[in-house]
Image (tube, rainbow, N blue to C red):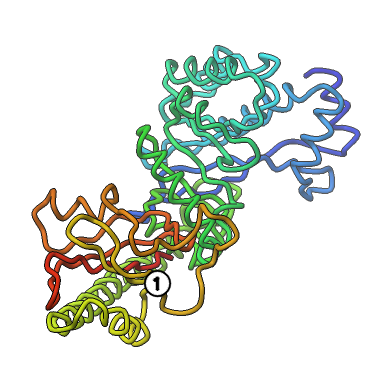
């Protein structure tokens, strides 16, 4: 053992290192797909020292690499000891200090040798690295390529914080992207976080990676993450760290089934509720359209104002002519738009063209009289919405399109 490292342990009264294991759960099945090894330094009085204290001290004294190797070997040997009794597909997730990459301190060959010496197959190990904490892109890419060639999975940890770089994600091509707890926490009550979460999930899908929400501690956050397509989860809600993999699996098997069944039920209810809301809105739109054919165009705005005041889940309405030109003002359900301080965000007005908007060319392209767009950013409000359209005619004008903007949470 390096003398400097040995003195660091002694000065902090660290007797030895141990590993705890926290489950990573498949949110589609409830099954544990792996466990993250978490360092737990044991003091001479058998209490546990915060690993953050030990890592900070090791970095200050210049023996971080030695601590990394010791922590890695501790986790690998603890995992190997239980390996014969573990499910054949269970993965071990190991963290690395990203700062070491900037000094070429994490040698892929040394990592492979450590894993093989411990008797753990590389394909059972995922290496976690915080992309945003690495200054040298070349070293990050080298670490990922060499270790993937050696059979390891690559996980980008804490993604979405600080200076996470999308270009680097494309270079590294991780197998798993961990969405940072700062985004996951309170995502159920924060529309902005939900949008960021949705974007990271889409990014992961695009590059062929799985998304993982870390720091899950609230059931409503879990519900939102699952509904938005996050595939994996980790956090106290799904399982706390345990001193062995077997103990971790036992605790998770006791608590998970009930929660997963509740999750399934709530997801189903959410789908049913959304379907009912859409059907209700469609019926209200159909009823309005049926009442308009005998109304002159000049009187339509009054009808629209009456209608929008009586319905829920609607942000604004407006009419287009057959050429995609708006023929009424934009009529809001309540109050002025959220954003009015800049011309970039303003409601469209009578006379504006909508020809290049999906809800204008979509029905023509698909030969449909009704249409519902994908979510998009509304210039009228600065919020995410979808637009539902219906084609109809008035007493004095044919080929009109009724447009209703529906806010998206």
For the N terminus, which image quadrant?
top right
* Residue found 64% across the figure and 19% down from its top: 136
Q: Mark 1 sits on what residue? A: 315
Relative image position of residue 140 (x, y in whole percent): 57, 21
Residue most extreme to the left: 367
Location of residue 296 by image quarter: bottom left
For the C terminus, which image quadrant?
bottom left
Q: Name the foreground residue: 381 vs 200.
A: 381
Relative image position of residue 112 (x, y in whole percent): 52, 17
In the rendered image of this protein, does residue 127 appear above or below residue 137?
Answer: below
Image-based side of 31 in relation to 280, left or right = right
Relative image position of residue 56 (x, y in whole percent): 81, 35
Location of residue 69 by image quarter: top right
Q: How many marks?
A: 1
In the rendered image of this protein, does residue 5 appear above or below residue 43?
Answer: above
* Residue found 77% across the figure and 34% down from its top: 55
Name the element at disc 1: loop
Image-based side of 184 in relation to 5, left or right = left
* Residue found 41% across the figure and 78% down from its top: 333
Q: Name the foreground residue: 171 vs 246.
A: 171
In the rendered image of this protein, does residue 119 appear above or below residue 273?
Answer: above
* Residue found 13% across the figure and 52% down from its top: 364
Q: Name the foreground residue: 135 vs 241.
A: 135
In the rendered image of this protein, does residue 79 appear above or below residue 379?
Answer: above
Image-based side of 193 in relation to 397, left or right = right
Relative image position of residue 407 (x, y in whole percent): 40, 67
Q: Mark 1 packing: few (<14 Cα in 10 Å), some, or many (20+)?
A: many
Residue most extreme to the right: 11
């Amino acid at each position: 053992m390096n003398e400097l490292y040995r003195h660091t342990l002694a000065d902090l009264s660290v007797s030895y290192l141990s590993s705890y294991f926290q489950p990573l759960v498949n949110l589609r099945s409830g099954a544990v797909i792996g466990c993250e090894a978490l360092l737990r330094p044991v003091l001479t009085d058998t209490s546990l020292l915060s690993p953050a204290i030990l890592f900070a001290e090791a970095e200050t004294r210049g023996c971080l690499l030695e601590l990394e190797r010791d922590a890695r070997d501790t986790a690998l040997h603890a995992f190997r000891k239980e390996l014969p009794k573990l499910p054949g597909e269970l993965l071990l997730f190991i963290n690395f200090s990203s700062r070491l990459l900037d000094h070429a301190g994490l040698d892929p060959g040394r990592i492979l040798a450590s894993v093989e010496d411990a008797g753990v197959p590389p394909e059972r190990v995922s290496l976690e690295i915080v992309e945003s904490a690495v200054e040298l892109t070349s070293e990050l890419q080298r670490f990922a390529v060499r270790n993937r060639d050696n059979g390891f999975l690559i996980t980008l940890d804490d993604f979405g914080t600080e200076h996470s770089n999308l270009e680097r994600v494309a270079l590294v091509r991780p197998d798993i992207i961990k969405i940072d707890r700062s985004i996951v926490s309170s995502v159920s009550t924060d529309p902005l976080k939900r949008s960021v979460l949705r974007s990271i999930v889409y990014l992961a899908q695009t590059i062929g990676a799985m998304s993982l929400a870390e720091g899950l501690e609230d059931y409503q956050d879990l519900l939102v993450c699952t509904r938005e397509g996050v595939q994996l989860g980790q956090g106290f809600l799904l399982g706390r760290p345990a001193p062995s993999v077997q103990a971790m699996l036992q605790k998770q098997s006791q608590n998970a089934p009930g929660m997963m069944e509740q999750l399934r039920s709530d997801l189903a209810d959410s789908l049913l509720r959304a379907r009912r809301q859409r059907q209700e809105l469609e019926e209200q739109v159909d009823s309005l359209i049926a009442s308009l054919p005998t109304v002159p165009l000049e009187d339509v705005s009054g009808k629209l104002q009456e209608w929008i005041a009586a319905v829920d889940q609607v942000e604004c309405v407006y009419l287009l002519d057959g050429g995609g030109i708006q023929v009424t003002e934009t009529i809001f359900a309540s109050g002025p738009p959220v954003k009015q301080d800049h011309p970039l965000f303003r409601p469209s007005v009578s006379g504006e063209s909508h020809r290049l908007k999906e809800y204008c060319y979509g029905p023509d392209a698909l030969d449909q009289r009704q249409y519902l767009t994908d979510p998009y950013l509304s210039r009228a409000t600065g919020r995410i919405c979808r637009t539902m359209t219906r084609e109809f005619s008035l007493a004095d004008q044919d080929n009109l399109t009724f447009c209703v903007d529906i806010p998206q949470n």
